[in-house]
Image: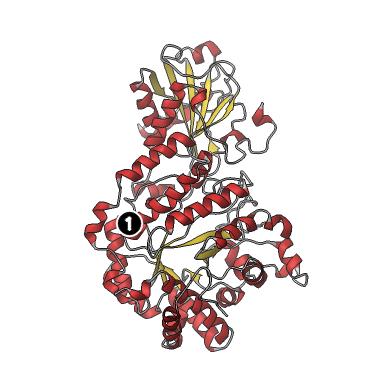
Amino acid sequence: MVNLKANPYFLSDEDIKWVQDTIAGLSDEEKVGQLFFQLTSSPQEEYIKDLAERYHLGGFRYNPMPGQMVQMQNRFIQQYSKVPAFIACNTEAGGDGACADGTFIGSGVKIGATDNLEYANALGRMSNEEAAVIGCNMAFSPVCDIAYNWENTEVIGRAFGNNPERVANMSVEYLKGAHTIEGFACAAKHYPGNGLDCRDAHLSNNVNNLSLDEWMASYGLVYKKLIENGLDAIMGGHILMPKVVNEINPSVEYDDMMPATLSYDLMTTLLRDKLGFNGMVVTDASHMVAMTNRMKRVDMLPLAINAGCDMFLFFNDPDEDYTTMLNAYKNGIISEERMTEALTRILGLKAHMGLHKKAKEELVPQPDALAGVLGKEEYKEMQKAISRDAITLVKYKDKEVLPLTPEKYKRVMIVNVKGAEGPMAPLMKMMGYDNAGKAAAMLRDKLIAKGFDAFIYESPLDKMKKMAEAGEKPSINLYFAGKNAIADFVKDMDLVITLCDVSNGRPAFGMSKGGGEIPWYVFEIPVVVVACGQPTMLADIPMARTYINTYDGKESTLDALVDKLVAGADSFTAIDPIDSFCGFYDTRL
């Protein structure tokens, strides 16, 4: 059923015997446990021991923690696992996806902007060197989606761009970089391909409406190249592909259409039979609405396995989900043949990674190894180089604006535009993860160091908020405070930088009635709009005449931005990896 001597396993007869003997020696409960990846909630030894021994888990994922704690947790995981476990991380943009003190290298869209394959390779290597030293052995990366839809906030900043060839080549380079690390595997995501629908699969359905020929020329091209280059595993996305399914299997009715993780036509017929993928498949997180809204959970779990997924990502309730899958196996809903096939791929990949040849205490590096890898200077220098080469001058209508010099524009006002706060914002602030305003403050200080008189704009809403916090009754007149003479508005500044610090979604301008938040005044005073997060701000600020994407607000990025602003337009060498004009006519005016 599974050729363990072929790509991506390349196992010897001895390795194959270990796989077969191990499967033969597993109880029904242990077999079912190998199908599950579980998210841990604590690094404590007793909790990990109970999780590993009660559910016999095949894989683990965890919440962000300092590297030392993750490494300790991972040591417990391998110690109490009968079969060596997958321990996965989200190193799609750097080692900070493996641990809190890992190094951010650069998001997919930022790497795409450099058009430099060496940077994609470095991302795969450096991110996962940090992951491996804390005991992780699998990356849920690269993100090989294609950013066709500017409104898709789920992947617009994570994918390498909207060009299938570039996405394919950079995904392959990430894989090659990760494969320089002994025993490390990658699960590319999100098959069959996110980026066409504007909706987030965490919250709603997500539809890829390409035909089979269109898909093969785009997303299929990406996965085919990855498979040819030894891709270990694939993460299945909860993505509907109605046209492709109907071309493969015309008998599927509209009401019976399933997301890829529950679709035999997509997971087996297309991925296995047509693309020839022989590796392991894991579902995306099973709490996502695009999966859970299709049927009862008791039916969903075994259907994911029968569709062709080998592992199931995350329990909802551990006892309930584990019992559901166990009963499905014992009752024949999951056949012996399908169970053996899934286990062969799971254990075959573990053998390919060499996990079976190491003693339990050797599966996780020793604590003293952390100091030589985490936060290595090489990684920090790579982050700086990528920032330097990625910053993109997307739109430049007022050709005389750059370079910025204190002689031309002594007084620079920075308008900090934020995104709408989500429901988790208050909790994040309480936990100390509130970065609001930090990028603007850093930019101000860096401009001052270059000789500018830079200051941050205070909006009418901010003034009203201060009054309320001081126990005063806010004056509603402040709401209309911006509606005054143009000469009065511009007299205190020579240039405005509108800094869009929006990490996800659309900008939130607040109660602006002619104030400074929205740059309505682009013909009154020079304005440079900079997006240091979501790279689609032109959709909401189409009047921008000079527009720059930096892709993040890290300090090294802002250093590079200031250097380029001072050096002039010729210093910007990056390409636009997406359609930053968002498909609108007016954004190009």
Q: Residue sitting at 44 percent across and 77 percent down?
A: 12
Residue 460 drawn at (x, y percent): 47, 27
Q: Looking at the figure, which quarter contains the N terminus?
A: bottom right
Q: Residue sitting at 54 percent across and 37 percent down?
A: 507
Residue 335 drawn at (x, y percent): 58, 85
Q: Residue furthest front?
A: 12
**Closer to the camera in the image, 487 or 5:** 5
- Number of other residues with Cα within 10 Å of mark 1, as a class: few under 14, some 14 to 19, many 20 or more: some
Q: Amino acid at mark 1?
A: Met
Q: Looking at the figure, which quarter contains the C terminus?
A: top right
Residue 381 drawn at (x, y percent): 35, 40
* SS for dot 1: loop
- Mark 1 lies on residue: 65
Residue 291 drawn at (x, y percent): 58, 65
Q: Residue sitting at 35 percent across and 31 percent down?
A: 470
Note whether 191 is above or below 397 in the view shown: below
Q: Residue sitting at 37 percent across and 34 percent down?
A: 469
Q: Residue furthest right?
A: 250
